[in-house]
Amino acid sequence: MVRKEWKFIRNNKLILISVLAIIFIPFLYSIFFLKSVWDPYGDTKNLPVAVVNLDQPVKYQGQRLAVGDEMVDNLKHNHQLGWHFVSAKKAKEGMKDKKYYTVVTIPKDFSANAATVTDKNPKKMQLKYSTNASLNYIGKVISDVGTEKLNSEVREQVTKSYATAMFDQVKTAGKGFKQASDGAKKLKDGAVQLNDGTKTYTAGVSQLHDGIATMAVSVKPLQAGVAQLADGSSQLTNGLDQLNGKTGALSSGVSQLANGSGQVTTGAVALSKGLNELQQKSGALVTGVSQLNNGALQLKVKVPQYVNGVYQLNDGVQELNAKTGQLVGGIKQLSSGAGALSAGVKQYTDGVSDGAGQLQGGVAKLANDTKDMPSSINALHNGIADIAKSSKQLADANGKISTGLGQVADQVSANDISKQAAALKQQMASIQTQLVALNKAVGNTQTNGGNTAQSINDQLSKIKSDVGSLTSASKTTTSTNGGVSQATINSKIDGAGLSAEDAAKAKSALAGVANGSQNKTTTQTVDANKVKEIQSEVTNVQGEVTKLNNLSNEQAKISKQVAELTASFQKLAAGANELTGNSDDMKQLAATLKKLAAGSQEVTTNLQALSSGSNTVAGKVGEFAGSASDLTKGVAQLDSGAKSLASQTNKNSKDVKKLVSGSQELTSSLAMLDKQTPTLKSKIGQLAAGSNQISAGTGALAGGINQLSNGISAASSQMPTLVSGVSLLANGGNQLAAGSSQVTGGLNTLNGQVPALVSGVAQLDNGGHQLNTGIQTLNSSTGTLINGVNQLNTGAAELDANSGALLDATKQISDGNGELSSKLADGAKQVNSVPLTDKTANMFAAPTKLKHTNYSYVPNYGHALAPYVLSLALYVGAIVFNFAYPIRKVSERGGTPTQWFLSKVSVGTVVALGMALVETTIMMIAGIHVDHVGQFYMTAIMISLASMYIVMFLSMAFDNPGRFVAMILLMLQLGGSGGTFPMEVTNHFYNVIHPFLPLTYSILSFRQAITSGLGDGTFEQAMGALLLFAVIALALLWFSMNQLQKHHLENKSQLDDNQKLQEVER
């Protein structure tokens, strides 16, 4: 029956096409649905949102604040939504015409409200937005999310602006704290001064209080005194009246008094001058007496010392008298020595001057001669090297001559001897020429040394050139191919299994590889040869350098050996001449040959000695060359020292000339002294006699001096009394003269002023009357004055009582200002030490940072929705299949229910497998990335089979009502399988039926297969549940088919009646 079922499908083209089309239905359902929502959140930049900026900039903290403009600038670089910056009118029209999903409005007071953050009542910034949820709710949700994020960005930006402004204020406050600290310090200093001033003030207040208290006490009797003053004033007025009447008599009396006073003044002035002169002389007198007294006392003290000195002087004079003989002899010796000193100094001066000059000239010549010594030594070394080389050549040539002489001695014939003698003579001449050149080379080593140095420089230049060519040649060998031969390449091509034509082409194409390798190998060989040549040349140069360093100071030995060698060759030449001159005399020839052989041997010996000596000389000169520069430097220093010595000698010569002149004067003086020695001897005798007389009179001198000292002391003691009396007398005379003069002047003035006095007395009389009137008024006001003084005393007492509190207050101000200055300084340090940078402002604006990690990664919304859509599509495919395929039709009569069951199940199974494989494969090609491909295919197969078996059971058992139930089950699974929203936010009813729906498990399994993250057990559990659904559905399907066949309802279906109903309608 299974075969019959498939044969029916194959023969019925409509059924076959329907079955094949049904297999692609799940794929088509999935692809169209998923691609339409593949990545909606990734394309939100295309969602049109209108932005209306009505904001007006304001000034905040002295800076322009335009939050709306900054927000628009940021949105122009924000591609989360499709921002359109339009006017309010266009935004309204766009919303009406369904052009915009959302309109975001930045009100005109947006920045103004932002600037109220520090006001008493700050206003919030309102970012307004309007959405059209009817146009698309998801679009509205996306707009809400975008606007919320925009609002967060605005908050962050404004907060950063606030923080920046606050930071500026904090920095300004920090500077203000510093200034305030400085000001508080000044306040402290001012408070200290205030405290000091307050102390002075309180002291003054205390004194004021004391003074006013005294005044208050003293003013009490004032009233009585003023009354008495008033009485006295009345009396004064009366007296002035009487005085005014007596002024006439006064005028005449004053005139007489002025005349008498003039005469008295003249006498007083003369007396004053005499007394002043006496006072002036008394000072000198006192000084002289005092000095005389002091001198007498000192004389008195010193007289014993003088006596002792006289005795010592007498003893010395006697000894001097005894030594005069020795003095005369010493003076004569001194005179003789002075003459010798003068001659010696002159001789030393001349010798030093000449020696210094000669030393300076010699050192200068030595410095000049040694200036070129290093180069000369190098030339000497080079010349000696040439000498050694020439000596070796001469030794070799002389060896040949010795050999030739031996052969000539053995084989002698007249003609041969003549020829050989002539040839020998020529060789001798050549050797002698070489000797002359050698001798010349010994003297001119500098020139030959220059040539050798030039040779070394040429060789070094050649080495540099060769090294350059070696470097350039080496660059061409860097890409060698390892030296693969053409035969090896051909064998590899033959073993590759190519056709004959392809092999020939390959060999031809690779023919140049081997050639290139050979060329590169040749180039490398050339480089190796070049390196060997350079090494050889370097060895030669090292040999030359060794010769240059083997110099010595044995030039005299080389010259001697060259001279001996020349003499030997002269003997050889003489023998050769004898040989050519007497060629017939064989004996003489033999003797001559022997002489020549001996001379040649001697020459050879000398040449070898010369060569050895040259080498020794070269070594010694090389050692000397190393110190030649030091010698040159030493000579230069010696030259400098010689010049300095000559200069110092010139300076010393002047002093020596003075010494010579002085010594000559000394000699002359000593000569004169020698002449005066007899007179000196006589005078010393007289001095001895006088000394004895002085010694005898010292006792009387001591007694007289004591009497003199006592008398002067007595006179000195009376001098103060004398001086005091003279001073008093002089002062009195001066006062008398001055007073008399004043009296006279005053009387004259008085006499001249008497008229004015008379007038003044009259005025005084008038003033007395006025004074009397004023005093009477004062007398009547003394009561008021006393009351005022009492009040002033009370106020001063209060001030004095509060002075202590004032001092305490000023001290508190000083201490408070000091503490204020310290705290402000600490506050300034704390404020200024806070790092208020842009990073700090960013931290204020956005203190948190959201960091997201994926436990499992879902690329986009299409991948998230795929498990749900794929499962749903397979279930829909099962429903469509059971609508289109005649599920109750029996392909063969007489079969059993099981055969019928197997025939229908085989078709349903193949269609379910086809739908699952086609859907999963093409969806993977279409862009779904799967973590576990095997699980992905297995899940699709299991949900497809379970759905097919469930729908087949419902369609088979209940026909059209069963298909309707299958549709109802589809609706339940749309909400209860958890394919879109989490079950936690879904209605309770759907949470109840959720565990009993096949799509619940297929969705979980698809999610695990596509993006993982649900655990390893999820797939196995889902497969078990789907397998259980499939088995139960198959069991129910077999049971229902068994019942249908049992009741003979197997070929009857309401689908057939549907066709009949369609016919009736037509």
Image: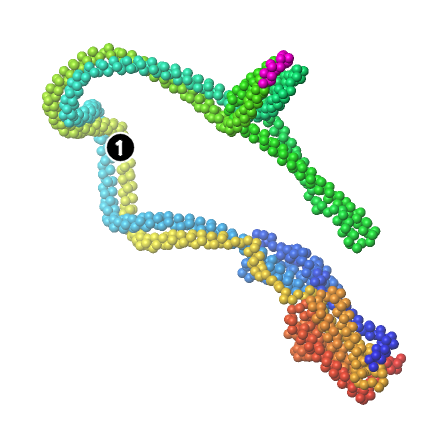
Quarter of the figure with residue 707: top left
Quadrant assignment for the C terminus = bottom right
Quarter of the figure with residue 275: top left
Please say which color scheme the image uses.
Answer: rainbow
Quadrant assignment for the N terminus = bottom right
Quarter of the figure with residue 330: top left
Residue 471 pos. (x, y %):
66, 38
Relative to the observer, which residue lies in front, 911 or 339? 339
Question: Label 1, on which residue?
Answer: 758
Q: Tell me which secondary structure the magenta stretch mostly adopts.
A: helix
Q: What range of the chain is rendered magenta?
A: 579-594
Residue type pointed to by label 1: Val
- Around disc 1, counting alpha carbons within 10 Å, would you say few (fewer than 14), some (14 to 19), or many (20 or more)? some
| Vertical order, 209 against 92 (above or below) | above
* Residue 271 at least partly seen: no
Residue 326 pos. (x, y %):
21, 16
In the image, what residue occupies the spot 60% across and 14% down? 588
Q: Is residue 809 left or right of residue 981?
A: left
In the image, what residue occupies the spot 59% across and 61% down? 849
Residue 586 colored magenta?
Answer: yes
Q: Is residue 919 left or right of residue 320?
A: right
